[in-house]
Image (cartoon, rainbow, N blue to C red):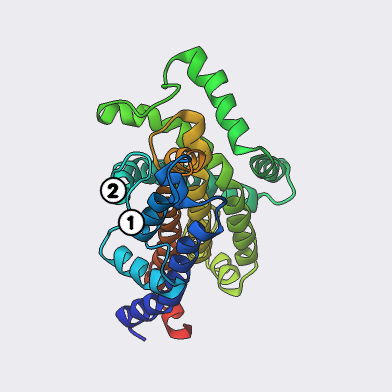
Amino acid sequence: MSRYGFVLRRGISLVPLLLGIVALVMLLLDLSPGDPARLVAGPRAPQAQVDQVRHRLGLDLPVWQRYLHYVGDVLTGHLGTSFKTGRAVGAQIAEQLPVTLAITASGVLLALAMSVPLAVLAARRPDRLADHLVRGFGVLGIGLPTFWVAIMAIRLVALPTGWFPVAGFGEGAAEHARALVLPALVVALGIAAPMIRSLRSTMMELADAEFVRAARTLGFGGFGLVRRFQLRNAVPPLVTVTAAQAGYALFGTVVVEVAFGMPGMGLGLVTAAGTRDFPLVQGYTLVFAVLAVLLYLLSDIVTSIIDPRVRITA
């Protein structure tokens, strides 16, 4: 199967999943407590006004009609209007999306920069001090709550040193970069452990592979052997694990953005949920879910480029 055919097939297979996500997001309005029409009209509004609002929002239509209308709105980029601000949901998300993507991307890159050398170090010295220390770091990273790590980063690093802002995103590229350091570090610590564990396990399995033993007999050794024969073959599984952890980090930015006061989608979602601004909650949920699905599609594409055997067996 060609690369383009593989990508097309993967993309088509995700269409039912995306339609299901849209359906669940639409039903958030029905599953939420209270009457959205009453919330918009006001607690003291007469019933006639509440009925008018319900008709304007399309809440008096059958579910299947509302679903078709919602799918059409999503395809045209119209995600509704905020109950509280009256702004278009899509416009508000477009302003906050770059912050969330910047935190997620920087956190994933930092996690990769930490995971690869630590996993290689542990795999080359199994059951030795370095291996135990790396595995202990992984357990610590999994066990520590993200919100607590963020608070500790603020109290122990940002406040004493003054090198990084305590809250906000700043103005200009330099301030943005300073503001991203601690949030990215918190995200990286939360997702690095599974990446280290997966890469270490793969490297140790490859150490006993026939082609690696053959390379040793030909005189290869040290880091050259690791880089050319082990690490290169460990990349495809690492890509899959990284995509999964990137999806986790994407949703984890909700906690990080609240802790650091970053004006991204995570903080916007928490604020919208607190004010029961249902169209905003629906919009944020939909965008988060679609981004997670696209991450998995991207991982399949990258894996197929690195390892053509994936396209053959798919």
For mark 1, give the secondary structure. loop
Q: Position of residue 189 (x, y in %)?
A: 56, 40
Residue drawn 47% across and 14% down? 161
Residue position for label 1: 79
Q: Amino acid at mark 2?
A: Ala
Please, which residue is most extreme toward the right here? Answer: 127
Q: Which residue is mark 2?
A: 88
Res. 76 image quadrant: bottom left
- Mark 2–mark 1 distance (CA, rounded to whole Å): 7 Å
In the depicted structure, whether residue 60 falls above or below residue 312? above
On screen, residue 124 versus residue 113, left or right, reads: right
**Nearest to the observer: residue 82 or residue 294:** 82
How far from the left and from the top, in percent, is residue 221?
A: 55, 57
Left or right: residue 149 compared with residue 257: right
Q: Quadrant of residue 84?
A: top left
The residue that appears at 52% across and 45% down in the rendered structure is 252
Are the residues tagged 2 and 1 within 8 Å (C-beta)? yes
Residue 231 appears in the rendering: no
Nearer to me, 114 or 52: 52
Give the structural element (helix, strand or loop) at label 2: loop
| Occupied quadrant, residue 54 | bottom left
Q: Nearer the viewer, residue 51 or 16?
A: 51
